Amino acid sequence: MFGAVTVKKGREKKLRNGYPWVQRGELASAEAEDGALVRVSDMDGAVVGIGTYNSLSRFPVRMLSLNDEEITQEWFANRFNAASAVRERLINGTNSWRVVSAEADGVSGLIIDKFGPHYVFQVRSLGMEKLRSLWFPALMDVFSPESVMERSDMAGRKEEGLEPVAKMRHGNVPVTTEIEEDGFAYTAPILDGLKTGFYLDQRETRRQFAERVQPGEKVLDLFCYTGTFALRAALKGAEPVAVDIFKPAIIAARMDAERYKLNYPIVEANAFEFMEEGPLGPYDWILIDPPAIAKTADKRDSLKWAIWKLVHGAIPHLKVGGRMIVCACTYQMGLNNLLETCRLAASDRNARFTLENVTYQDLDHPMPLGFPEAAYLKCAWLRRDA
């Protein structure tokens, strides 16, 4: 039984073009319980599609389909299979990737990551929570996982009226598992790491960095998490220093260094404090990949300030001719804003930089043109000029 939602005149166009969210101000009427499936119509009564409803959310309607159809276990299985088929054509050199990317794969509010035979999911909306009895059996049937971990412990659940949850859902979830990528192995702390346990979205940036870093170069990897950039640098014969404050990630980083019999500093410290206290530089590479901080527009200034402070603090420790990779992991800071923040920090240091490259999330984290918020990760590669 569907509830009924009507969107204001003209608001249906972006939905039909693939935008998955309806904001509160775009609703003309709503007759539905929170968490229910709803039939979404335009002001003329034409059905736009099917979604879920939650009056508590900034986005009270999250679209699932542009067809007037039942949402069943088979429907979810079809979505999962379609998402997997795309990844099989695009992703190579790894046994781990995002198999379902929420809105970008037509299942708003649900993320599923694969780490070899182990799977980790996040439920980000009340509607998807209410549909668990349909999509979880579909997950089991389509992917046949050895274990399944739920990491629905993100802050955004509060807005949906949901409590954070981190719980084993199937099998024996290991504390860590091994990820294969381009012939190398990384440790992923899937039981108690951040997000789903590993930054799969940085795969392409890791690859390009590993191609460019040279033996003997000095590398500072700030907010290193499990230290994958530092590890790839060390394997190339460079001299990295990895810094992060999150103990499970530091443990994983040290496990990887030990696996390859490498000995380089892996420091458990606040990156901001480390920048002030050192030991620092001069470095050939400085990587800055802070937490998203700004998930909503009202937090955007906080993120700008954090990135300005990090870049401003890093510049004195970067060699002329050296590179700085600065990442922003949120739609709330676009590429132009990221570059402007870096420019201001450089100007305040009387330093000059050239933009050499920009990398984004890898292809298992799709960026549909109709949903610009999906393009969340961007990394600016800056060269310090004389």
Image (cartoon, grey):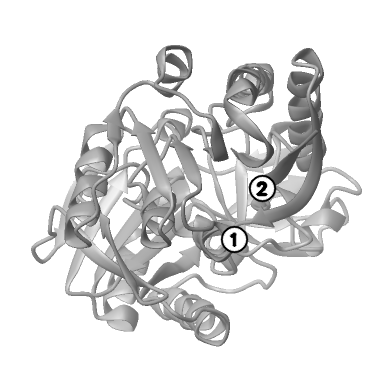
Taking 366 as reference, is 42 above or below it?
A: above
Tell me if residue 301 comes above or below residue 125 in the rendering. above
Helix or strand or loop: what does disc 2 sit on? strand
Residue at the outermost right position = 10
Residue under the point 42% across and 79% down = 77
Q: Nearer the viewer, residue 156 or 215?
A: 215
Task: Name which quarter of the figure residue 111 lies in.
Answer: bottom left
Label drawn at residue 378? 2
Q: Is residue 274 left or right of residue 337?
A: left
Q: Look at the image and tell me in which quarter the C terminus lies.
A: top right
Image disc number at residue 212: 1
Whether tag 2 and tag 1 are in contact, CB under 8 A, the answer is no
Residue name at image x 57 percent, y 25 percent: 317
Q: Amino acid at mark 2?
A: Lys
Looking at this view, name the residue that lies furthest to the left. Answer: 172
- Residue 109 position in % (x across, y down): 49, 52
Marking on residue 74: none
Q: Is residue 253 visible?
A: yes
Front position in the image: 311 or 235: 235
Q: Mark 2 vs mark 1: which is more N-terminal?
A: 1
Alpha-carbon span between mark 2 and mark 1: 18 Å
